[in-house]
Image: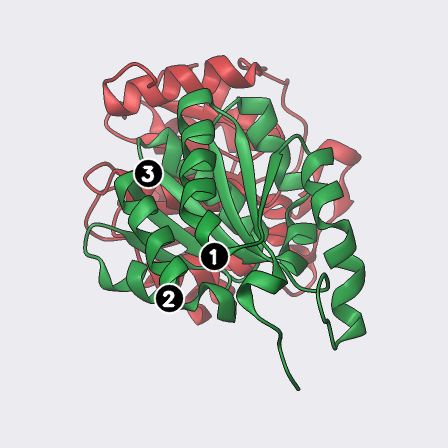
Amino acid sequence: MAWQDDVWAVLKAQEIRQVAYVPDAGHSLLIRKAHADPAVAATVLTTEEEGVALCAGAWLGGDRSVLLMQSSGVGNCINMLSMIETLKIPFLTLVTMRGDYAEFNPWQVPMGKATETVLSAMGLLVRAVERPEDAADLVDSAARLAFHSHQGVAVLLRQRLIGRKDF
Amino acid sequence: MNRREAVARLIGGREDILVVTGLGSPTYDVAAAGEKPNHFYLWGAMGGAAMVGLGLALAQPKKPVVVVTGDGEQLMGLGGFATVGTAAPKNLHIVVLDNELYGETGNQATHTGQGTDLAAVAMACGVGTACVVQDLDGIDAIALDAESGPSVTVLKVAQGDDDRVLPNRDGPSLARDFRRHVTGQAVD
């Protein structure tokens, strides 16, 4: 899980102060780190769209934040993502993918196929991590793009990176 | 209780608080109390007002954050009560102006006049203080501070159309000016 440690180090270096999440196994290390860090407010959500609004509020209050979610949650966010483009504020989300590699569960496939299209349609820039050695650099560059250039940026963590979910 | 009088009594003269409004009538009600730098007006993102307030409250724990929204807006973000109850920020106060109607779309009935008790939902979600206020005098008892939250107050307001008072709806300037007011810094 070394790449996840790298990603956490990047988020800390980028002075992320709030982490909002709907859990996913692929985010479990970041979630544990966030709760263990007294300088970070970690917030569990009931649905991912709450996190879009929460991240907007965090920015208005002077905090950088990140939303952690699974690809199935991207669909839940669509209208709330209007805030990012309308307000022209930074927004960073890390999305663990389902339905794009060796997927066992057909119910995960439709939203997995649509994830990138949906994010792009709502005005976000989308990057994807396929290999562990790229994770830190791509998350770092996405954070800089978001917080310095005031963009909405999503980083997809591909299923091949995270590993197959076996049943 | 008239909603405009209620909002004026709630936030009038309070420059120490940060106010986030829910789209529709609550945005107009807060604007009618005066367009101020400590107000952030939502014109969309239905269901998100309380969560904008939560992110803001976590970023600024010493400043009272007051979300002024409507029953329809809060119903769309009902799960947010569970998130607020769990995060438990002491400086977040959610005030729901409840007229039991979707006012912006032709006054269709919402759930709150038909059995849904938003204060009871909030209490059941672990929000420490949740109550219903029926008259203007009850507003003075609502503590908008940085110590006693989180709270949810449902203000039962009269049905009836007030004039629309339209604040700035240009998103980038709203966000930039409000953030500058909150942090004292230019946007980085």
Residue B177, quarter of picture: top left
Amino acid on which disc 2 is placed: Leu
Q: What's the residue at 40%, 39% (across, down)?
A: A140
In this figure, which residue is indicated by the disc labeled 3? Answer: B65
In this figure, which residue is indicated by the disc labeled 1? Answer: A132
Question: Are labels 1 and 3 on one chain?
Answer: no
Real-space CA distance between mark 1 and mark 3, rounded to the nearest whole angstrom: 41 Å
Mark 2, Cα crowd under 10 Å, few <14 / some 14-19 / many 20+, is some
Amino acid on which disc 3 is placed: Val
Amino acid on which disc 1 is placed: Pro
Mark 1, Cα crowd under 10 Å, few <14 / some 14-19 / many 20+, is some
Q: Colour of chain B?
A: red
Residue B5 visible in the snapshot: yes
Quarter placement of the N terminus of chain A: bottom left
Nearest the viewer among B118 and B54 is B54
Residue A17, quarter of picture: top left
Real-space CA distance between mark 2 and mark 1, rounded to the nearest whole angstrom: 15 Å
Real-space CA distance between mark 3 and mark 2, rounded to the nearest whole angstrom: 31 Å
Nearest the viewer among B72 and B163 is B72
